Amino acid sequence: MPSFPTAGVIGYRCLMQRDPQSSGGRVTAQECAIADGQCELWEHSRRRDREAGFTLVELMVVIVIIGLLATVVIINVMPATDRAAATKARADIATLEQGIEMYRLSNLRYPSAQEGLQALVTGNFIRRLPNDPWGNPYVYAAPGPSGQPFEVASLGADGARGGDGENADITS
C-alpha cells in the first residue's frame, strides 16, 4: 500500500472515474490506496480562503475599462442632445409661426413688436409661451428682415446673436 502525506492535506482527488454519488472526486487516503494510487493531493489551505477576492490591480483594470466605455458613450451621445435641442427649437418656432398666422387671421394684422409673442397667449392662440431648449425666450421681430412680415428666432445656447454650432441662431 503506498504511503500518502497527510500534513496540511484535506483530502485526495481521485483520478479514476467515480460514481455520481461521490463527493466531487474527493477521497480518503484509504480509498486512494484501493484505487492503486491514481489520486493526487488535494490541498486547500485555510490561508487561501482568507485571501479570496480581487487584487488592487484587477480592480484598477476594471475601473479603467468602465471609464473608457463611459467616455465612448458620452462622446456618441452628446452630439445627439445638441441635435435634439435644435430640432425642438425648430418645432417650437413652427408652432409660434402657426399661432402668429392664426392671430393675423383673427385680427387682420400681425402682432406688433411691442405686443410680441405675448399677444398669442393673451388671445388664446397658444396655451403658454415656451422658452427655447437653452432656457432663453424666443425673439420676435415685426417686420422681419428682408421684407418678411415677422421673424421668430432662438439665439442658441449662448443667448446672443450670431454664433455657430450649438450657439447658432435658429430662425423662422
Image (tube, rainbow, N blue to C red):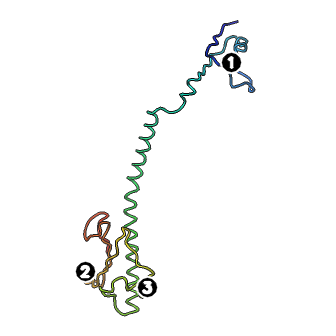
Image check: 165 left or right of 25? Answer: left
Few, some or many C-alpha atoms within 10 Å of disc 3 (few <14, some 14-19, many ≥20)? Answer: some
The residue located at (39%, 77%) in the rendering is 94
Element type where label 1 sits in the image: loop
User: Does label 2 or label 1 sit earlier along the sequence?
Assistant: 1
**Residue extending furthest bottom?**
108
Residue 166 falls left or right of residue 69 = left
Quadrant in which the N terminus appears: top right
Residue at image position (60%, 19%) is: 43
Q: Which mark is residue 150?
A: none
* Quadrant holding the C terminus: bottom left
On the image, numbered disc 3 is attached to which residue?
125
The answer to whether the residue labelled 2 contacts the one labelled 1, judged by CB atoms less than 8 Å apart, is: no
Depth check: give the residue in front, 145 or 68: 68
Cα separation, mark 2 vs mark 1, equals 92 Å
Residue 41: x, y in percent? 62, 16
Mark 3 or 1, closer to the camera: 3
Q: Which mark is residue 16?
A: 1
